[in-house]
């Protein structure tokens, strides 16, 4: 192509499935931090403010409540428990989205290339099996969301697997 100064094939390195409402709910760094905190245990707004403050992320409780409302509307948290305290109702929230933040090594892709290749081959078989399942056809009647829905199923299964307290070993899986 004449005049082209630079061109390369760019491949996806990460996949995230989510609707626009959930994506909007993640539009503030404080909300992501709240999801991290709520991933550990259910907490009330005051406890969240204290937990964020102790990690250098100071926010007023009223601001935390605003963020909680936004996260709840986005479906990223739910009320897990309500307790009566001195005549008032205190709500405890839990995250419905598991958030992991970490700075991986800059060369992770290079160091883990073989593992990524091996895992992607296994996942391709899993995705193919999901899409070939009769129950899957009922989820995607018009065929427009095939890949998205298959990835959502894998995503939900991954979330369920991370809830387990002990990692499964080959021996335990047999």
Image (tube, grey):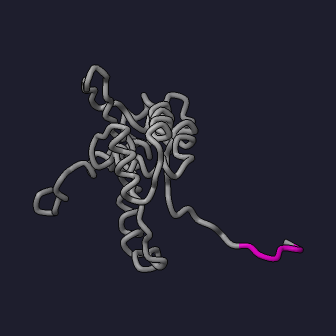
Number of marks in picture: 0
Residue 144, image quadrant: top right
Magenta-tinted stretch: 2-7
154 and 35: which is toward the camera: 35
Q: Is residue 6 above or below residue 95?
A: below
Q: Main secondary structure of the magenta part?
A: loop
Q: Is residue 15 above or below residue 78?
A: below
Q: Quadrant of the C terminus?
A: bottom left
Residue 55, image quadrant: bottom left
In the image: residue 167, left or right of residue 43: left
In the image: residue 26, left or right of residue 47: right
Q: Is residue 65 above or below residue 6?
A: above
Residue 122 can be seen in this image? yes
Residue 3 lies in the magenta stretch: yes
134 and 70: which is toward the camera: 70
Q: Quadrant of the N terminus?
A: bottom right
Q: Residue at x 40, y 47 (%)?
A: 35
In the image, farthest residue toward the top: 87
In the image: residue 70, left or right of residue 92: right
Q: Residue at x 58, y 39 (%)?
A: 20
Residue 71 can be seen in this image? no
**Picture coordinates of residue 62, whole percent (x, y):** 47, 36
Q: Residue at x 11, y 62 (%)?
A: 171
Residue 132 lies in the magenta stretch: no
Q: Residue at x 40, y 53 (%)?
A: 53
**Picture coordinates of residue 149, whole percent (x, y):** 46, 40
In the image, farthest residue toward the front: 86
56 and 34: which is toward the camera: 56
**Picture coordinates of residue 26, whole percent (x, y):** 52, 46
**Picture coordinates of residue 40, whole percent (x, y):** 28, 49
172 and 25: which is toward the camera: 25
Residue 125, image quadrant: bottom left
């Amino acid at each position: 192509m004449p005049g082209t100064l630079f061109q390369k094939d760019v491949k996806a390195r990460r996949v995230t499935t989510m609707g626009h409402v959930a994506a909007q709910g993640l539009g503030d760094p404080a909300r992501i931090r709240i999801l991290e905190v709520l991933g550990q245990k259910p907490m009330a707004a005051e406890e969240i403010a204290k937990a964020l403050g102790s990690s250098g992320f100071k926010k007023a409780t009223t601001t935390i409540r605003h963020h909680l409302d936004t996260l709840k509307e986005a479906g990223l948290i739910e009320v897990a428990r309500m307790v009566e305290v001195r005549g008032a109702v205190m709500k405890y929230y839990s995250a419905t989205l598991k958030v992991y933040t970490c700075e991986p090594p800059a060369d992770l892709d290079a160091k883990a290339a073989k593992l990524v290749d091996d895992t992607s081959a296994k996942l391709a078989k899993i995705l193919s099996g999901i899409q070939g399942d009769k129950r899957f056809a009922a989820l995607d009647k018009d065929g427009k969301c095939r890949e998205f829905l298959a990835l959502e199923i894998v995503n939900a299964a991954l979330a369920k697997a991370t809830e387990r307290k002990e990692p499964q070993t080959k021996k335990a899986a047999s």
